[in-house]
Structures are given as C-alpha cells and as structure tokens.
Amino acid sequence: YSAFNNTALVQAAYQATGRTSLTFGGIYGTLQGGSHGTGFINGNNIYGMAGLSHALTARDTIGVTYTYGTFHYVGLPESFKVQMAQLSYGRKVTGRLSLQLYGGPELMAYTVLGHPARSRIYGSGMGALSYLQGRNTFSLFGGRYATGGSGVLAGSETTTISAGWRRSLTRRWSGAVYSGYSRNSVLPVAMTQTGQHYAYWIGNMTANRALSRRVSFYISYEYEHQINNAGPCGASVCAVNGDRQLFGVGITFTPRPFGL
C-alpha cells in the first residue's frame, strides 16, 4: 500500500518586550492511503495555537500555550476535537545542556454521527532534553497526547519517546540519525475499536548539504516497523503488522524573517 501525508504550517512570533514574546501558529494536514479500505483511514486535521513566554532569568523561561484541534475522517462517522492548555518551563542547565517541559489538561470531545458527543479531560505532557558538544547535538524527547491515529485508528492516545544525534561534518555537510518508539491506543472516549492499539518503531538517517544560506539539499533513508494487537482482521480498515523502507530526497528553503 502507499500513503501520502501533506502538511502546511504557518507561524508568527512577536517580541513584545525584551523578555516577553507571543507566538501564533496554525497547521493543516491530510493523510491519504490510496483507495479507502486498503489498510489506511483517510482524514484531515486542523490545529491552531497561541502562546506566551517570559524569560525569568538568563537561564529560566516560563510560558503558557493554548491549542485547539479538529480531526475528521473520510467515509467514517467519527470525528473529535481537542483543547489543550499547557504550562511550559525551559532551563539552560549548563552552557551545553538545555531542558524543556510542557504539561497541562487536555479536553477531548469525541463524536459519532447519530450519537451525543462524549467528553473527557486527561493529562498531556512533553519533555525535551538536548546536549551540545563540539559539532555534535544529542536530543531526547518524550510525550503523551492525542493524535489523529496515523491512518490506522480513528483517533489515538499516543505515548512516544525518541532520541537523535546530529553532527556537522564540514562547513556545508551535516548528518543526522534518529530513532523513536510510540504506542497508540484507541481514545478513552471513543465508542468503536475498543481495546485496539499498535506499536510503531522508526529509524532514520539523513545527510544534508547547504547550497546557500537559505537553501539546502537532503537525502534520507527510513525504516519503519509496526505491530498491532488486533490479530486477523476482516474489516475494511485494519492496523497491519509489517515493515516499510522509505528513501527520500528534497530541497529545504528557509525564508528570511521579516519584522512587523
């Protein structure tokens, strides 16, 4: 099977004072897995967010972020909305080590056509740790939050952890290695697919070459492994066990920032 994931993102930041900044952003994404019923659920999602951050000291930063998102699926009666308010804390532990923490309540409203919406509040959070040593950057990330289900579930509660290593090889060349694991379960408020979950492993290697200050070229290889607990499936859409290898090339363009 094949899948196409398209995402458009816009973000703006405003420096209100020397220590306080405002951030606004929006994301629109679509997932198309070939013809419906061949192993993927087609759908789309929209996110909007607004955040405020304030530097307490040269090392410590606090903030608050509000996020609103909607998820819809092609050919299925399910849809859901999320609202999330998170407090954040960032600290430069040393000149090389930095920490970011996010956490707060997430309100989820899940709807199946012809039934009343079901709502639930539960905790969500994320944490990131990065370490810089010479030409090397090491990173570690973990989180728990609601996602669209990645074409396998009509919404999921995702717990994920990942690690990465990036190294500057020359003035123009750099390389990165990334590995991650996630466990995706049916949303607690969902009325279908009760008890279903799947695990997902990923490994990625990327080489990047800067062509100019704002344009770069990359080539990548990715290996993915998926395991589900559903057993044999006779439904039109199923989470499948399997492996996938992806090869990619592309151009990255970073526009020049402009002030308002």
Image (tube, rainbow, N blue to C red):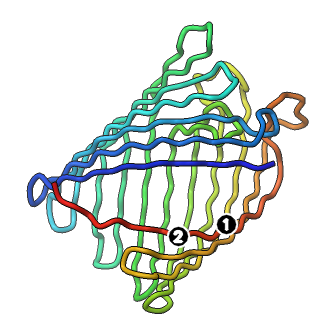
Dot 1 surroundings within 10 Å: few (below 14), some, or many (20 or more)?
some
Q: Is residue 169 above or below residue 205?
A: below
The residue positioned 72% from the left and 25% from the top of the image is 194
The amino acid type found where label 1 is placed reads: Gly
Q: Which residue is mark 1?
A: 203
The residue positioned 57% from the left and 48% from the top of the image is 6
In the visual, does 196 lie left or right of 54? right
Q: Is residue 22 above or below residue 116?
A: below
Dot 2 surroundings within 10 Å: few (below 14), some, or many (20 or more)?
few
In the visual, does 106 lie left or right of 256? right
Residue 102 is marked as none
Q: Disc 2 and disc 1: Cα gap in Å?
A: 21 Å
Residue 251 is marked as 2
The amino acid type found where label 2 is placed reads: Ile
Residue 249, by quadrant, is bottom right
Q: Secondary structure at mark 2?
A: strand
Q: Is residue 93 above or below residue 237?
A: below
The residue positioned 41% from the left and 85% from the top of the image is 133
Q: How many marks?
A: 2
- Residue 140, horizontal then vertical, whole percent: 49, 65
The residue positioned 72% from the left and 30% from the top of the image is 195
Q: Earlier in the sequence, mark 2 or mark 1?
A: 1
